[in-house]
Image: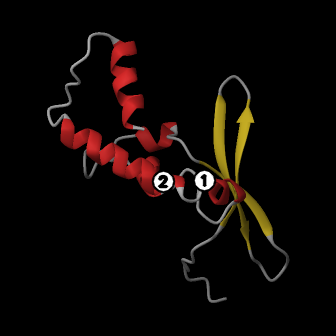
């Protein structure tokens, strides 16, 4: 313990949903410590601090959605979903290749949804 910053990957124990005015999702982490483990929650969606513009880069400070996986594979929810992602990714890829200019040949949201469900 020399006071230097140390980065170590932490496994997500569970994806929690908290319902207040809006539903929000959090990753529950356990940080190991010699004095006892600490439980910590990280909000998964974007926060106001994430949207702040960094004066040096003129870009938003942090895009949380690009850095955090909503449902990590090692959690109970991730194990329930195991095997579904690969199929959905190939369906999305096939759908994108069929309509390269993001135009689905349908009139209205319901007709577009019907075409999209057909790919699933």
* Whole-number angstrom distance, CA of label 2 to CA of label 1: 7 Å
- Identify which residue, 51 or 29, lies in the foreground: 29
- Identify which residue, 12 or 116, lies in the foreground: 116
Furthest residue toward right = 36
Q: How many marks?
A: 2
Give the structural element (helix, strand or loop) at label 2.
Answer: helix
Image quadrant where residue 101 sits: top left
Q: Which residue is mark 1?
A: 81
> CB under 8 Å between callouts 2 and 1?
yes
Furthest residue toward top = 108
How far across and down, in percent of the image, does residue 60 sit? Answer: 34, 44
Q: Residue at x 26, y 16 (%)?
A: 106
Image quadrant where residue 67 sits: bottom left
Please tell me whether residue 34 is drawn above or below residue 26 in the rendered image: below
Furthest residue toward left = 101
Please tell me whether residue 24 is drawn above or below residue 28 in the rendered image: above
Q: Which residue is mark 2?
A: 85
How far across and down, in percent of the image, does residue 45 sit? Answer: 53, 42
Residue 85 visible somewhere in the drawing = yes
Please tell me whether residue 12 is drawn above or below residue 113 in the rendered image: below
Colour style of the rendered protein structure: secondary structure
Q: Which mark is residue 25?
A: none
Image quadrant where residue 36 sits: bottom right
Task: Give the quadrant of the C terminus.
Answer: top left
How far across and down, in percent of the image, does residue 8 sit? Answer: 57, 78
In the displayed structure image, the side of residue 75 where residue 6 appears, left or right: left
Q: Residue at x 44, y 52 (%)?
A: 87
* Mark 2 surroundings within 10 Å by alpha-carbon count, few (fewer than 14), some (14 through 19), many (20 or more): few
């Amino acid at each position: 313990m020399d006071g230097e910053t140390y980065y170590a990957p932490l496994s997500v124990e569970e994806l929690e949903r908290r319902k207040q005015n809006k539903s929000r999702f959090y990753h529950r982490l356990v940080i190991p410590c010699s004095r006892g483990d600490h439980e910590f929650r990280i909000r998964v969606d974007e926060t106001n601090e994430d949207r702040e513009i960094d004066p040096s880069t003129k870009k938003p400070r942090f895009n949380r959605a690009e850095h955090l996986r909503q449902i990590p594979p090692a959690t109970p929810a991730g194990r329930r979903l195991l095997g579904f992602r690969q199929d959905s990714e190939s369906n999305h890829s096939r759908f994108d290749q069929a309509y390269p200019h993001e135009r689905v040949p349908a009139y209205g949201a319901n007709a577009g949804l019907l075409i999209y469900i057909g790919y699933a």
